[in-house]
């Protein structure tokens, strides 16, 4: 226990920082893509148009039954095959995360939409607003306001999930830490350091969520 | 798209055997980890709601710690780091003589991680019962233990059946992370078949179908459970 | 102007409305009352098609609300509606609440919509509050805003569903005063309310409902003078002796 060598972290800081940047970018882009696609799926499910609702429900339930790692494997296999050429690990991973997280976001957003009182929809209808106008101006703004804390929480989970690109050796923070750990033979230092970094970011995020929730109820 | 379909590959003795063994390991990890997660999770969840400040703080710390570090990192800590930082003899035993180290590590890592999520559900369930009933129980002359035993726990356990179902499913999905420490569970086996045969489509489809069947099965069980445990006319606070 | 002809409506197996018939002429004020659960809200929501009916017909001017091809959105934009719980958009200021429909449905310019909003809001005495959000106003103020929001669409008729029953007693009158003024200006109104003072003062007719049926549909003085049905007598004696 006495021979903890912290210099290994210091010496590899630029490499680790690059990995962390990749993790953060992947998180940010996947959150944006996931929310957009998830909103679409939620609106499809609530549209009352049977084929649309069924297709969206089927997709969401399918994705929610399988592990993220399997989804990553799927898209690493499918994306190059469908495009006829490799497009690089980052984009395959990004597509996998967007497709995967959209299923989870759509459930959050659907609950958010349903939490808007029915009277609000009636009020919009009574003014003669169309279905899409009511969603756009009345329901979604209120739903998103209510959902911000949960959306951020899901973003934190997504950030943790990005560590799974380890299984396809994409150089995120986790993979970078593990490369350093192996090449320098310093497993204990590197994995504890990785845990600390993830913990700090996620814990700060969850404190932020708590602030948001307090601000909302106040 | 250039692709040679060959669904037959899934039924060739060797690969079929891989799949079956994968399913076996997935169940073995998920179920054992679930038992651990329930035991620890209920204790920690109840602990967070207790009037005793130190206990509540300790339990909160547990949840925050396990929830804010990715499961993958936790598995690596258990697998690679734990043997290094425990006393030498124990470390040597863990590295050399512990039977089935990947499996044991996966169960402990996944179980303790899921416990933090279970704890949150248990706490939410207890809080949902509300202060009114708690006061009523205390007013009846119940002790804290009796209040939990006869009022809070029976009600909250029924309230949390639906979210716990979803946790149960999550543990099956998360058991796939065991492949990162070399346990050949279902996802790993399908990936291996894909690599050996170049029939990725068939291999991943097989794994997907099996996961969907597991999810459907769990949902059916949960709905039955929910029906039998439902309290007539009570849906919780609000 | 509004004519409801033999409508029936079910929620699954449960029949909420049974063969209801009534009408509201141009410039008329009709008050609908009756015990809780008798179907008043349901009836009034059928008028602008917020709730579909399974049998019968509703005509507004010459448009058939219940017919398949009717452009409901367009029809709704011409009928104002005021709800029990106000239903102001909480994420928009008073001004934005009044402008949304004008701009998105009637496609008025921003200036035009604003001018209209300010004029209406000053009529109900709330101009100083026009930039506030609904959550910053009292219930009575919110309901006056909701009435103005409906009027901003230049409706040909107004529907009210218990506009004062979510209000504290001291705020009821500020809302009723606005409604009385509106009635005296000749607005066509259908009002679900238990405020019998209001009914006496401005209603031309009173419709009394019970268990999903129109039990009485009479001129106001007749209704208060000698209600025919026992149920209506019962109901009146209960709420008048309060
Ligand atoms: N969406 C619905 N599904 C099933 N039943 C409903 C629904 N909405 C209303 N009802 C039932 O229809 C009946 C009439 O409801 P409605 O709201 O029209 O009554 P009301 O006369 O307005 O009563 P109140 O004075 O309480 O507002 C009630 O028995 C109610 O329970
Ligand atoms: Mg009503």
Image (cartoon, coloured by chain):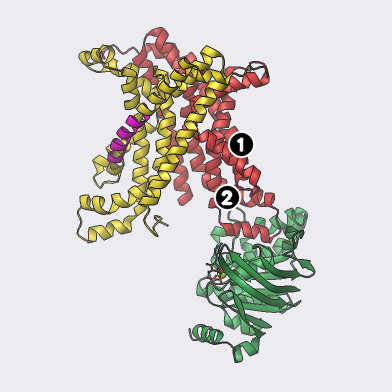
Chain colours: A red, B yellow, C green
Mark 2 — residue?
A142
**Numbered disc 2: what chain?**
A
Please name the predominant secondary structure of the magenta segment in the image.
Answer: helix
Numbered label attached to residue B214: none
Kind of element beneath mark 2: helix
| Furthest residue toward right | C62
Q: Is residue B108 visible?
A: yes
Residue B33 in magenta stretch:
yes
Seen in the image, is B81 located left or right of residue A39? left
| Furthest residue toward bottom | C225
- The front one of C21 and C133 is C21
Query: Which class describes the residues within 10 Å of circle 1: few (<14), some (14-19), or many (20+)?
Result: some
For marks 2 and 1, the one nearer the N-term is: 1
In this rendering, is residue C98 above or below A157?
Answer: below
Query: Which class describes the residues within 10 Å of circle 2: few (<14), some (14-19), or many (20+)?
Result: many
Q: Position of residue B190 (x, y in %)?
A: 49, 20
Q: Is residue A24 visible?
A: no
Locate ligand 1 by image quadrant: bottom right
Point 58% across, 36% down: residue? A59
Q: Which of the 4 image quadrants contains residue A55? A: top right
Q: Position of residue B123 (x, y in %)?
A: 34, 45
Q: Position of residue A13 (x, y in %)?
A: 45, 15
In this rendering, is residue C123 above or below B79?
Answer: below
Residue C112 in magenta stretch:
no
Looking at the rendered image, the quarter that the N terminus of chain A falls into is: top left
Eye-nearest disc, 2 or 1? 1
- Image marks 2 and 1: residues in contact by CB distance under 8 Å: no
In this rendering, is residue A204 above or below B84?
Answer: below
Residues shaded magenta: B29-43
Numbered label attached to residue A37: 1
């Amino acid at each position: 226990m006495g021979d903890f060598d912290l210099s290994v972290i210091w010496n590899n800081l630029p490499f680790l920082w690059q990995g962390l940047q990749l993790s953060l970018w992947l998180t940010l882009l996947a959150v944006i893509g996931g929310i957009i696609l998830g909103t679409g799926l939620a609106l499809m499910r609530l549209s009352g148009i049977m084929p649309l609702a069924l297709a969206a429900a089927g997709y969401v339930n399918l994705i929610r039954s399988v592990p993220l790692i399997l989804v990553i494997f799927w898209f690493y296999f499918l994306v190059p095959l469908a495009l006829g050429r490799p497009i690089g690990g980052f984009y395959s991973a990004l597509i996998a995360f967007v497709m995967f997280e959209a299923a989870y976001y759509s459930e959050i957003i659907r609950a958010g939409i349903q939490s808007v009182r029915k009277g609000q929809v009636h009020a919009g209808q009574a003014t003669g607003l169309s279905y899409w106008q009511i969603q756009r101006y009345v329901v979604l703004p209120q739903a998103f306001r209510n959902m911000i804390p949960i959306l951020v929480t899901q973003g934190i989970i997504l950030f943790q999930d990005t560590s799974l690109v380890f299984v396809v050796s994409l150089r995120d923070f986790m993979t970078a830490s593990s490369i350093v750990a192996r090449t320098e033979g310093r497993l204990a230092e590197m994995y504890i350091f990785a845990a600390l970094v993830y913990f700090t970011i996620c814990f700060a995020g969850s404190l932020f969520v708590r602030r948001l929730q307090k601000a909302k109820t106040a | 798209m250039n692709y040679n379909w060959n669904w037959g590959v899934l039924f060739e003795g060797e690969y079929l055997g891989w799949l079956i063994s994968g399913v076996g390991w997935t169940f073995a990890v998920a179920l054992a980890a679930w038992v651990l997660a329930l035991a620890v999770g209920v204790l920690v969840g109840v602990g967070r709601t207790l009037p005793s400040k130190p206990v509540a703080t300790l339990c909160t710390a547990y949840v925050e710690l396990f929830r804010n570090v990715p499961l993958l990192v936790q598995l690596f800590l258990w697998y690679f780091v734990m043997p290094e930082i425990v006393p030498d003899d124990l470390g040597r035993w863990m590295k050399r003589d512990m039977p089935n180290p990947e499996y044991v590590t996966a169960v402990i890592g996944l179980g303790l991680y899921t416990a933090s999520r279970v704890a949150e559900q248990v706490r939410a369930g207890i809080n949902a019962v509300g202060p009114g009933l708690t006061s009523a129980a205390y007013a009846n002359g119940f002790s804290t233990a009796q209040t939990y035993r006869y009022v809070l726990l029976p009600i909250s356990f029924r309230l949390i059946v639906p979210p716990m179902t979803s946790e149960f499913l999550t543990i099956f999905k998360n058991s796939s992370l065991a492949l990162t420490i070399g346990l050949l569970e279902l996802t790993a086996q399908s990936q291996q078949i894909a690599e050996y045969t170049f029939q990725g489509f068939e291999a991943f489809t097989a794994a997907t179908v099996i996961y969907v069947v597991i999810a459907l099965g769990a949902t059916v069980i949960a709905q039955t459970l929910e029906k039998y445990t439902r309290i007539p006319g009570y849906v919780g606070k609000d | 102007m509004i004519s409801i002809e033999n409508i029936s409506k079910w929620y699954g197996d449960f029949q909420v409305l049974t063969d209801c018939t009534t009408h509201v002429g141009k410039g008329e004020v009709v008050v609908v009352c009756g015990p809780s659960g008798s179907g008043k809200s349901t009836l009034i929501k059928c008028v602008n098609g917020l709730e579909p009916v399974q049998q019968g017909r509703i005509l507004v001017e010459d448009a058939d609300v219940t017919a398949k091809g009717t452009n409901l959105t367009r029809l709704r934009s011409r009928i104002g509606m005021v709800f029990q719980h106000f239903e102001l958009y909480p994420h928009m200021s008073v001004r934005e609440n009044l402008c949304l429909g004008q701009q998105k449905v009637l496609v008025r310019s921003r200036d035009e919509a604003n001018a209209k909003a300010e004029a209406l809001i000053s009529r109900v005495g709330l101009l100083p509050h026009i930039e506030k959000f609904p959550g910053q106003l009292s219930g009575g103020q919110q309901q006056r805003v909701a009435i103005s929001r409906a009027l901003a669409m230049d409706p040909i008729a107004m529907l009210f569903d218990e506009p004062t029953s979510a209000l504290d007693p001291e705020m009821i009158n500020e809302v009723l005063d606005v409604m009385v003024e509106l009635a005296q200006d000749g607005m066509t109104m259908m009002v679900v309310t238990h405020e019998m003072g209001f009914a006496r003062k401005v209603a031309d007719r009173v419709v009394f409902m019970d268990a999903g049926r129109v039990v009485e549909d009479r001129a106001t003085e007749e209704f208060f003078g000698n209600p025919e049905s026992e149920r209506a007598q019962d109901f009146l004696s209960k709420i008048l002796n309060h």
